[in-house]
Amino acid sequence: MASFAAFGGILFGYDTGVISGIKEMNFWLKTFGYESPAGSGTYTISTANESLIVSILSLGTFFGALFAAPMADTLGRRMGIVAANLVFCAGVAMQTAATAVPLFVAGRVFAGLGVGMVSCLVPMYQAEASPKWIRGAVVSCYQWAITIGLLLAACVNQGTKDRNDYGSYRIPIAIQFAWAGILSAGMLYLPESPRYLVKRHRDADAARALGRLMSVPPDHQDVQMELEDVKANLRMEEEVGQSSYVDCFKMGPNKILFRTLTGIFLQAWQQLTGINFIFYYGTTFFKNSGISNPFLITIATNVVNVCMTIPAFWAVDHVGRRRLLLIGAAGMLVCEYLVAIIGVTISVSNQAGQKVLVAFVCIYIAFFASTWGPIAWVVTSEIYPLAIRAKAMSMSTASNWLWNFGIGYATPYIVNPEYGNLGPKVFFVWGSTCVGCLVFTYFCIPETKGLSLEQIDILYQNTTPVKSVAYRDQLIAHNVHAADEDAIARVTTEVRMAEKGEKGEAHNEEKV
């Protein structure tokens, strides 16, 4: 049931991917652009309008993600998703009807508001409704749905790009009504998040919802034990502070400030890997690089993105979040530097070289799809305490979209011939940012695989990300619950004594 909510990723991915192809379609350029040179029959669009049309969606999603917090705490996670779909459909209607840039841009803004809300609410709902042993895989389904949306957009664009009528761009845009309808209808039949219901002090409803998710009666022992953990954690959070935005930036034993900033920066670093350069401007980039059919290459890169997200379903709950993020950052930075080096050393007419360039772009996408793509959403959906989860997660998601907007708006100015003209040299920038991803992960991301959301709170209170693996292992070995303060103290003491013992042995070896 929680996995169905991942369908929201289709909206995100499709809306992100569809513009990449639409802005290269001849009829769309004729409708929204201008003839250049005059009398040539060739149409183009100004760099300023291209930047605005591509990036304005992300500006809408930035505010949509922020609006998601009050929506999640008032309407609930489930009905919040339904409401977000209505806003999204208003934007799709505007884009479908548009024949001039202003209305098209307004439609992109409203669609962005809807996508921004969905991109925050769906992972939140999934994390709160999933059992701990498969939570990573369930939330990863959201990223997989994003990749499927990107692939569907590329395929639909390929099918309509040669039409010489309004259907060339209206068909790909209007298809989004179907995605929103499917998601809204499905969410009406799913249970509300049990943790949201506990936060609203609706304990009986929470028991029924959790029992339905676990396929057991509401009075089952497992249901009651998990609800007690959730309530114990919430009581402790409410004693420390309320659930305002100010509380998201408070220092204290729960390390709320550190956790809030971790989510905000993690989503920023995900965008700074450069992945959306490929999916926003991939068609244009491959075209300028001398690829004969850039639309087909775009489909190929999307197929890689979809297929390589599947291994993450297994790896995220077996290899772990922290380790996969480190592996992914290292793999991406190597590929991006190689793409940059190949791009600046070969000519556009060198077909063999261009194929190698495409191959390394695909390997880079494979590293992203199996690591940073899904796991950034997994981590940000689980590291926050219940009292501030909606607000903190809305800010981390807004960070993703703010950087998405900045990159989307700046890229044409960076790579287009009449401006920065970096071309493939832009991959030197993305490679360097992946070095930052590597350093950030090592110092700021703890290992949380196999832990309940309440156990993650315990982990943050008693250890650091660098030492989190050992503490996590002890929490699982002793099956520590949030309501059992003696067990928490015992495990913390054991881990710290073990660390001191290791330091003592190392010191003695140095003396010898």
Image: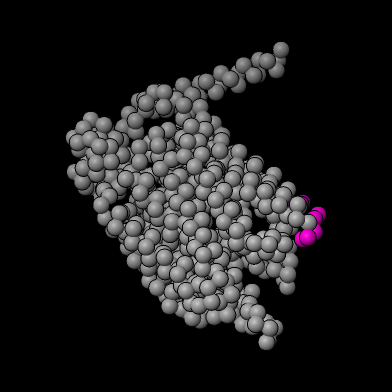
Quadrant of the drawing holding the C terminus:
top right
| Residue 243: % across, % down | 36, 52
Please identify the dominant SS of the magenta region: helix
Magenta stretch: give its range.
339-349
- Asked if one can make out residue 284 in the rendered structure from this viewpoint, the answer is yes
Q: 34 and 115: which one is in front?
A: 34
Residue 348 part of the magenta segment: yes
| Residue 55: % across, % down | 55, 67
Q: Which residue is located at x 39 percent, y 23 percent? A: 478
| Residue 74: % across, % down | 29, 58
| Residue 180: % across, % down | 36, 61
Q: Is residue 44 left or right of residue 199?
A: right
Residue farthest along the bottom direction in this orientation: 39
Q: Which residue is located at x 46 percent, y 78 percent? A: 98
Q: 141 and 443: which one is in front?
A: 141
Question: From what the image shows, is residue 438 above or below residue 29?
Answer: above
Question: From what the image shows, is residue 114 above or below residue 366?
Answer: below
